[in-house]
């Protein structure tokens, strides 16, 4: 009998703690599949900061280091520089972590073109701490701390991380993807694999932003959350490659 799907070896047997309809599980699987396909499980070190991803060490069969809130890129920098030839280092961060308390670490790691891979989950809200407004919450979005909707006159506009980092000279590769349907899941895996391969090739900083769901804190069913991604999130956060220096060189 043909094997249609097999659980990646880089993914443990531990049951995921994520809420029903949360897309963290899909992204975990894609990261694990890429680790398997590249044959780097024994060399890979994940960095899990505070947030819904705080327990990622339970789910990956590689070494995982816990970082303080927002500091994953700084920790990843230290790990990678300690043994650059043998370590493959990735961070797995939410938007409250990466784009708020950790913005400085993110920007400066990108500016230095640190040879690390960043997986950035953008679900437009603080998930673990109860659904507060995040730097990526959409204009008018209702959250626990913006019950009447995000007021841009008072709170400013959402931060578009890929667009912002693309203005830096440092980063090698920036792409925004999503996992709301089969086609987009496949595209997301391709982007994640490219980000890891860039590190193996010594090209530098690669970030894949995954537009994701948070049904619990959005107050939606899983089905409605996927629809909200399609109708609200993607128009504000367009999918696509925002920087790829290798492709730019080939085009010259």
Image (tube, rainbow, N blue to C red):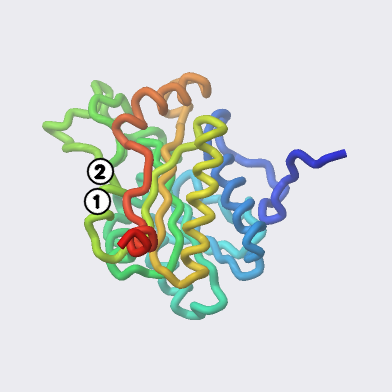
Q: Residue at x 17, y 36 (%)?
A: 155
Sooner in the amino-acid sequence: mark 1 or mark 2: 2
The x and y percentages for residue 88 are 54, 68
Which mark lies nearer to you, 1 or 2?
1
Report which residue position mark 2 lands on: 159
Q: Residue at x 47, y 27 (%)?
A: 216
- Quarter of the figure that contains the C terminus: bottom left
* Residue 110 appears in view: yes
Query: Which image quadrant for residue 172?
Result: bottom left
Relative vertical location of residue 70 with respect to residue 75 in this rendering, above or below: above
The x and y percentages for residue 22 are 52, 33
The x and y percentages for residue 203 are 42, 69
Cα separation between marks 1 and 2 = 8 Å
Tell whether label 2 touches label 1 (CB within 8 Å): yes
The x and y percentages for residue 232 are 34, 25
- Judged from this view, the residue extending furthest toward the front is 252
Relative vertical location of residue 115 with respect to residue 242 in this rendering, above or below: below
Q: Is residue 238 left or right of residue 93?
A: left
Regarding mark 1 in the picture, which secondary structure is present there? helix
- Judged from this view, the residue extending furthest toward the right is 1
Q: Is residue 156 left or right of residue 210?
A: left
Regarding mark 2 in the picture, which secondary structure is present there? loop
Q: Residue at x 62, y 62 (%)?
A: 38
Q: Is residue 94 left or right of residue 236?
A: right
Report which residue position mark 1 lands on: 164
């Amino acid at each position: 009998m043909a094997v249609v799907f097999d659980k990646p070896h880089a993914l443990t047997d531990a049951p995921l703690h994520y809420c029903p309809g949360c897309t963290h599980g899909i992204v975990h699987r894609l990261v694990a599949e890429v680790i398997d396909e590249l044959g780097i499980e024994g060399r890979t070190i994940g960095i899990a900061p505070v947030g819904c991803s705080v327990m990622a060490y339970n789910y990956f069969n590689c070494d995982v280091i816990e970082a303080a809130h927002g500091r994953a890129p700084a920790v990843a920098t230290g790990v990678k520089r300690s043994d650059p030839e043998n370590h493959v280092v990735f961070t797995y961060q939410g938007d409250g972590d990466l784009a708020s308390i950790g913005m400085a670490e993110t920007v400066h790691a990108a500016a230095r073109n640190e040879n690390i891979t960043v997986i950035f989950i953008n679900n437009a809200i603080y998930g673990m701490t109860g659904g507060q407004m995040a730097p990526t919450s959409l204009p008018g979005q209702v959250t626990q701390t913006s019950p009447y909707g995000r007021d841009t006159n008072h709170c400013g506009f959402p931060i578009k991380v890929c667009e912002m980092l693309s203005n830096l000279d440092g980063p090698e590769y920036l792409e925004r993807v999503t996992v709301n349907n089969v086609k987009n899941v496949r595209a997301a895996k391709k982007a994640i694999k490219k980000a890891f391969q860039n590190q193996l090739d010594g090209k530098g900083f690669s970030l894949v932003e995954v537009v994701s769901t948070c049904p619990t804190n959005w107050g939606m069913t899983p089905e409605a959350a996927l629809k909200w991604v399609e109708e609200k999130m993607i128009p504000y956060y367009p999918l696509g490659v925002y920087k790829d220096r290798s492709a730019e060189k080939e085009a010259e």
